[in-house]
Image: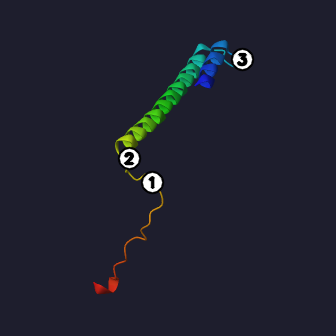
Amino acid sequence: MKAKIEGLLSVVENAEGDLIKADAAEERVIEEIRQLGQTALQTWATRQEIKQSEAYIAANPSSHRGGKKNSIGTADMDASKY
């Protein structure tokens, strides 16, 4: 998120020197803010997922936490019987 905020500040300062018109600056600021929002929401969602997972495991300590399946599947039906 720090990099996104720095990107927004570089737009304001016109660090690259390529923003001559207000429309171009506005578009760049909007894009930077969208990316900042996306990063913030992704970080929030990841943390929520971890919290929910930890809460579920704490409430259900005997729950199975993934791993390799032991089943080889079901037997194919013999097409000649039909």
Q: CA distance from mark 3 to mark 2?
A: 58 Å
Residue type, mark 1 in image: Gly
Of the image marks 1 and 2, the number of the one nearer the N terminus: 2
Question: In this image, 9 relative to 16: left or right?
Answer: left
Tag 1, which secondary structure?
A: loop
Residue tagged 3: 17
State the SS at label 2.
loop
Discs 3, 2 touching: Cβ within 8 Å: no
Quadrant of the rendered image containing residue 82: bottom left
Please state the horizontal and vertical placement of residue 37, each as a whole percent of the image. 50, 25
Q: Secondary structure at mark 3?
A: loop
Residue 51 versus residue 63 in the image, above or below: above
Tag 2 or tag 3, which sits nearer the N-term? Answer: 3
Q: Which mark is residue 61?
A: 2
Residue located 59% across and 13% down the image: 22
Front-lying residue, 39 or 21: 39
Q: Amino acid at mark 2?
A: Pro
